[in-house]
Image (cartoon, rainbow, N blue to C red):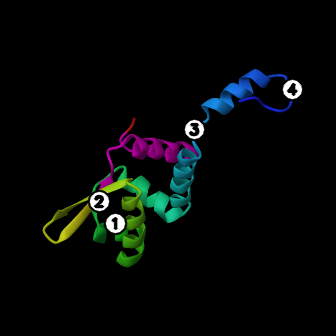
Amino acid sequence: MILPHEHKDKEHSELLAEEMPSLEGFTTASDIFRLLGDPSRVRLFWLLCHTEECVTDLAAMMDMSAPALSHHLRFLKTAGLIVSRREGKEVFYKSADTELADALHHIIEDVVEIACPDCD
């Protein structure tokens, strides 16, 4: 790509423009950030990075109704950030074992300066 203006680091900028990820990649990242734009959802995701728990207990821990919690869980699950498993009548949730979920967990901890209870 040839840029129209002559500037100090034009060659670097042209190379960067050629190597820039696709708009689709940035759209996906934007969608994930939008999903985590709700503080309750970020808090719930952080919690599920540290434990596997049923809806009833999660609702109590989050101080919200089960329907409200289920709404947030559905968004996180659709995005692939959490997984569920059924045990009898109960459904248990935890963070997905993916590179994306792990990276977001660490970003959240870094941003809000929460010490991970599993890390000393």
Taking the image as shown, residue 91 lies to the left or right of residue 80, namely left
Residue furthest left in the image? 88
Q: Is residue 106 visible in the rendered structure shown here?
A: yes
- Rounded to the nearest angstrom, the CA distance separating label 2 from label 3 is 33 Å
Image point (68%, 33%), residue name: 17
User: Circle 2 — which element?
Assistant: strand
Q: Name the residue under label 4.
A: 6
- Rounded to the nearest angstrom, the CA distance separating label 1 from label 4 is 57 Å
Taking the image as shown, residue 26 lies to the left or right of residue 46, namely right
- Rounded to the nearest angstrom, the CA distance separating label 3 from label 1 is 37 Å
Q: Which amino acid does label 4 sit on?
A: Glu
Residue 34: x %, y % from top left: 56, 59
Label 4–label 2 contact, CB within 8 A = no
- State the mark number for residue 93: 2
Q: Quadrant of residue 99?
A: top left
Label 1–label 2 contact, CB within 8 A = yes
Q: Is residue 113 visible in the rendered structure shown here?
A: no
Dot placed on the residue nearer the N-terminal end, 4 or 2: 4
Residue 24: x %, y % from top left: 54, 48
Crowd class of label 1 (few under 14; some 14 to 19; many from 20; radius 10 Å): many
Dot placed on the residue nearer the N-terminal end, 2 or 3: 3
Q: Name the residue under label 1.
A: 58
Q: Name the residue under label 3.
A: 21
Q: Which amino acid does label 3 sit on?
A: Pro
Residue 73: x %, y % from top left: 38, 65
- State the mark number for residue 95: none
**Residue range (magenta):** 93-118
Dot placed on the residue nearer the N-terminal end, 1 or 4: 4
Q: What residue type is labelled 1?
A: Leu
Query: Does residue 104 belong to the magenta stretch?
Result: yes
